[in-house]
Image (tube, grey):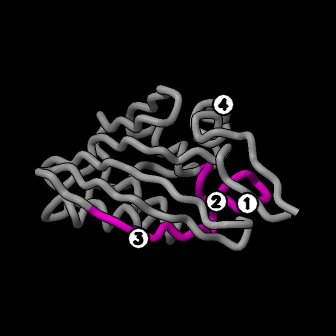
Amino acid sequence: MKTRMSLTLAALALAPAAALAEGHGRDLPAYVLQPNAELVTMEHLDALNECDWDRLMAQYPEEVLFMLPNGVWVEGRAAIGDVFAGFCTPREDGGFLGATFIPERVKTIGNTVNVSWRMEADFLAEPYKGADAYVTHDGMMYVQVTTFDPGEMVFAE
């Protein structure tokens, strides 16, 4: 039997932010610059697949912005850190630890890398597909526009 989750990434990002900030309990890591837009994006996807919070956060400047479905914005490095602290928890705790994002198509225009991807995980009844646009500058990721919406995923029971 399949179940569809109604939680959106916006809820993950906004509702438990204070709890997540206490939950990850880490200082933000030093920046790690990448030599070009594609490598910023590939580092992001690899760190995401590993749920490596330090590597994820090392690529975001203070003024980072995530644009989520339904017009929700999450701004600032600390707020994004809270999002990934929640993301990188086990499924039973509402996170996505163990998910793998697989790029299917990539198109780079200037410093923006556009990726269509599919997410696979043992806790999904079927792969979930989405797309992101990653706006980079000076070896870091400044803006991410994403279609990622857990409410559209079909979870295994």
Amino acid on which the number 1 mark rests in the picture = Arg
* Residue at which label 1 appears: 91
Left or right, 83 with reference to 8: left
Q: Which residue is mark 4?
A: 15
Q: Earlier in the sequence, mark 2 or mark 4?
A: 4
The spot of residue 134 in percent (x, y) is: 30, 49
Find residue 157 and report its image quarter: bottom right
Residue at 38% from the left image edge and 50% from the top image edge: 132
Residue 137, numbered label: none
Q: CA distance from mark 1 to mark 3?
A: 19 Å
Gap between marks 1 and 2 measured at Cα: 5 Å
Q: Earlier in the sequence, mark 4 or mark 3?
A: 4
Q: What is the three-letter code of the residue carrying label 4?
A: Ala
Q: Which residue is mark 2?
A: 96
Marks 3/2: CA–CA distance: 14 Å
Along the polypeptide, which appears first: circle 1 or circle 2? 1
Q: Quadrant of residue 104?
A: bottom left
Q: In the picture provided, is 2 more to the left or to the right than 18?
A: right
> Which residue is denoted by mark 3 in the rendering?
46
Where is residue 140? Give x, y as percent.
Answer: 23, 52
* Cα gap from disc 4 to disc 1, whole angstroms: 17 Å
Q: Specify which label sits upstream in the sequence, 1 or 3.
A: 3
Query: Residue 89: x, y in percent?
Result: 66, 58
Query: Earlier along the polypeptide chain: callout 3 or callout 2?
Result: 3
The answer to whether marks 1 and 2 mark residues whose Cβ atoms lie closer than 8 Å is: yes
Say if the magenta span includes residue 77.
Answer: no
Instruction: Give the SS element for disc 2.
Output: loop
